[in-house]
Amino acid sequence: MEIDKAIKDGIVICDGAMGTELQRRGLKRGETPDSWNITHPEQVKGVHQDYIRAGSNAILTNTFGASLMRLPTDSQYSVQELNQAAVKNARECAGDDVLVFGDIGPSGKEDQLPPYGTEPESNYYDSFKEQAVVLSDSGVDAIMVETMSNLTEAKIAVKVVVENTSKPVLCSMAFARPPASRPEDIRTAWGDALSDIIKELTELGVSALGSNCGDLVEEMPLLAAKMRDLTELPLIFQVNAGRPKVDDQYRSIYSLEPEGLAEIALQLKEAGANIIGGCCGTTPAHIAAIREKL
Amino acid sequence: MADLKSLLVESMLSRADAMSRTEKIVDDAIKDGVRADTILNEGFLPAMTIIGDQFSEGEVYIPDVLIAAKAMQAAVDKLKPMLSGETSINRGTVVIGTVKGDLHDIGKNLVKYMLQGSGFNVIDLGNDVSPEQFAQGVRDNDAQIVAMSALLTTTMGSMKDIIDGLEEAGIRESVKTLIGGAPITQEFADKIKADGYAKDAGSAVHVAMELAGHNA
């Protein structure tokens, strides 16, 4: 299915968290979720299927960290192997009716980018390119650049997708809590302003933009309204299930119940969001609640 | 020296001009006969703490901290030869790293810069650091504080393994543990019995000072 058509048909409901769901299925501390695409494909597919069953009509590949710059140096699998396996897992669950977004996360080394650091931009470009091309060739419907807190890095990743694939690219930024003195001035932790983000990503040719993760939860609908004022592009929002708490296994449990997230999802829709899903700590129950509410 | 401190906060936060303006303030102070350790202890250290607090409040952003740290480092390099013997500013040694399985550098680096800027000797073990490497780092450097960062919900649990590792190595009692990162909370710190939790790089300075027994 094409993303434009899906949006025209109504709200697209994305999936929720992958990492915490894999932990419930036995992912150990220190193990990268991305490696499970190859070592535990049935478990990864189990998560995808749970989300689709809960009502997601778009799912993200389990490839948040599967780029050269992020992969542990002792990774047993290559970027190509991980991304190929991840798309295969997602596609098998999605069939033709559910959209598959190839997930690209930040490098984790944004502070090494010039002008503050000394790592050449070309290294970031090459790392994103390797991942984006494999995702695209393996059959995703679109590529989603997400959890970006640095506009310079987000632009590199978006540019990579536009220049090296024919897939639509969605870009989602993580925002910091605004200071008490300027409660309306929502920026990323790097200080990137909303207006710059929208202008510069639009110029590069994004098909949709929005926000996920970060510090904002209840404030996301306000952010959506502000973005809607600045652009006519489709808007995507994936919200954390509140703040994490800890269970007896020292794993994180998120505090926002499915009902609470569904309420935020409704406000997001009213503020003009087109694609809505969950981020850290969300579960199939959260997605089911969103589906019901919308 | 409240004046010098405020001047430095302003200059270090002036983005493109930060390096040159900060350098000029230092040069002027030296010319006026202000001692090098006074410039550091009553100028830069409190200035960096103020910038850290502003970062905690969301008033300034990551690039501000990176630039301020760079401007301060340049000044420290210049002042070092002028420091009189034992009046150096070592507030203790911190071994810092991002935990096993986690490849994020930034949060850890920001804390590193802030701690360095506040007078700590910081040993950076990098990212994807195992419990054994943390224990080894503490032994090799005779560190007083172990600072751990985790940015992922899937890796924060590793902090418990690291604290257990220090226990097994028989050095748990000789170091303080400080943890932080996006998914980390005070509740989590209490649960894994970490000695301190910092919600961001600014508060990390205050917590580290407290753990090292300094009045902050």
Image (spheres, coloured by chain):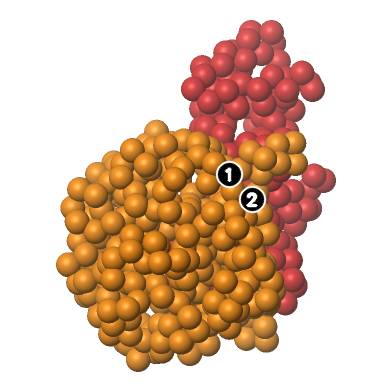
Chain colours: A orange, B red
Which kind of residue does numbered mark 2 sit on? Answer: Leu
Q: Residues within 10 Å of mark 2 (few under 14, many from 20)?
A: some
Percent x, y of residue A111: 44, 45
Label 1–label 2 contact, CB within 8 A: yes
**Residue reaching furthest to the right:** B215
* Secondary structure of the residue carrying numbered label 2: helix
Q: Residues within 10 Å of mark 1 (few under 14, many from 20)?
A: some
**Which label sits on residue A226?**
1
Give the residue displayed 37% in from the left and 66% down from the top. A6
Judging from the image, mark 1 belongs to the subunit labelled A
Residue nearest the observer in this picture, A194 or A176: A194
The x and y percentages for residue A283 are 55, 80
Q: Nearer the viewer, residue B6 or A67?
A: A67
Residue, x 31% and y 41% (percent of image)?
A204
Vertical position of residue A110 compared to residue B131: above or below: above
Q: Secondary structure at mark 1?
A: helix
Residue B148's spot in the image, x, y percent?
58, 63
Q: Report which residue position mark 2 lands on.
A: A222
